[in-house]
Amino acid sequence: MEKDQYRPETNAVRIQTEKTWQMEHSTPLFLTSSFTYDNAEEMRATFADETDNNIYSRFSNPNVDEFVRKVCALEGAEAGYATSSGMSAIFASFMALLKTGDHLLSASSIFGSTHTVITKYLPKWGIEHSYFDINNPAGIEALIKPNTKMIFVETPSNPGLEIIDLDLLAGIANKHNIILNVDNCFASPVLQRPVAHGVHIVTHSATKWMDGQGRVLGGVVVGRADLIKEIYAFCRSTGPAMSPFNAWVLSKSMETLHIRMARHSESALALAKALEGNPLLEWVKYPMLESHPQHAIAKKQMSGGGGIVCFELKGGLQSGTRFLDALKMLTLTANLGDSRSIASHPASTTHAKLTDTERVQVGITPGMIRISVGLENVQDILDDILQALEKSK
Ligand SMILES: *Cc1c(COP(=O)(O)O)cnc(C)c1O
């Protein structure tokens, strides 16, 4: 029962698992490891891929399928597979599509664990990589080698909010017959649809805006059917499947994703504008501020700026820790994309082990604060930030 004939907001609400004989309104939780058959012939046919019946929840599950169908409808993608976390979605996309001797070309400003996978683990299987500077797209083509198989990028990037032109990148990838893999976590499919720009596969941490309330981990990869087929085959055997419970939570969350992203974006823009020009700040960064270096690209490919705002404290590293200590309402936690506003200081936490030079290469400066703007009244968020800024001096 495909119901993806509606507009995206409606699809996010109305795509639903077929009703059971109980005629429930909301999708039940299918907490079951495996599925049953009436007879040996039905079981044989299902194992031979001659039916659409489920077999085992490592392969497929009704709750997980419902969530995947929603993400595919929102992203405009042909197929998808959901995983236990964003990292397992990204890792599976690498492992299923790359082999020994291949070369991966990745932006350098990417999520820390993705950086670890590319730098530390892929070389173990003989998969090489090079990093490019997202702020210098003209230099990308020169880094392509005969064995370059995939280009990977996050836009906007975490945490630096750097943005790259997806049309330009898709043009380069298609010219050289390379798979373009985009982590669309920061924008969500509500604000940016990479597939419409020619991107081949889109990865997500569903843990962030898709859940939106900081409850469950999840990941999803969607895109061209032939590529997703490879990823599915890899995952079916190796087991990073999403839990049906998490899928049930995430599918319910998708019903409110559009209204939440609109509010997160509206509050984040108001906050960014209120903070821009504050004498205690070096700069404020937000995709929809005209001062953002890639503002023109953001306006072209995003329908809103998203919920993350970054700023640089004039006092650098020490001011950063003083700022965190002075906050009264904003939470200090490692997540983002929550209904509750969160502050983080990458230089003293997630990226503390890097040298100053390495940090600059991944888009992080010593006094940089990342705010994940929640659903509270924006004035309360601003008030808390302003009083903490005074104490960070
Ligand atoms: C959090 C995050 C991930 C990893 O997702 P998990 O669900 O934590 O595994 C990947 N990419 C980006 C941009 C993220 O913010």
Image (cartoon, rainbow, N blue to C red):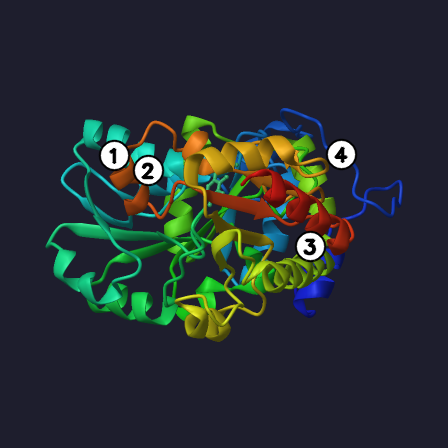
* Amino acid type at image mark 2: His
Q: Is mark 1 within 8 Å of ligand 1?
A: no
Q: Which mark is residue 119?
A: 1
Q: Answer few, some or many: residues within 10 Å of disc 2's Cα (few below 14, many 20 plus, some between 14 and 19).
A: some
Q: Which mark is residue 257?
A: 3
Name the residue rendered at 51%, 44% in the picture.
369
Res. 332 in view:
no
Report which residue position mark 2 lands on.
115
Q: Position of residue 339 (x, y in %)?
A: 71, 44
- N-term mark: 3 or 1: 1
Q: Residue 29 carries which label?
A: 4
* Amino acid type at image mark 3: Leu
* Amino acid type at image mark 1: Thr
* Label 3 close to label 1 by CB (< 8 Å): no
Q: What element carries label 3?
A: helix
Q: Residue furthest left?
A: 146
Residue 351 is drawn in which quadrant?
A: top left
- Mark nearer the viewer, 1 or 4: 1
Disc 3 and disc 1: Cα gap in Å? Answer: 33 Å
- Mark nearer the viewer, 3 or 2: 2
Name the residue rendered at 89%, 45% in the picture.
23
Name the residue rendered at 28%, 49% in the picture.
106
Disc 3 and disc 4: Cα gap in Å? Answer: 20 Å
Q: What element carries label 2?
A: helix
- Mark nearer the viewer, 2 or 4: 2
Q: Position of residue 167 (x, y in %)?
A: 36, 71
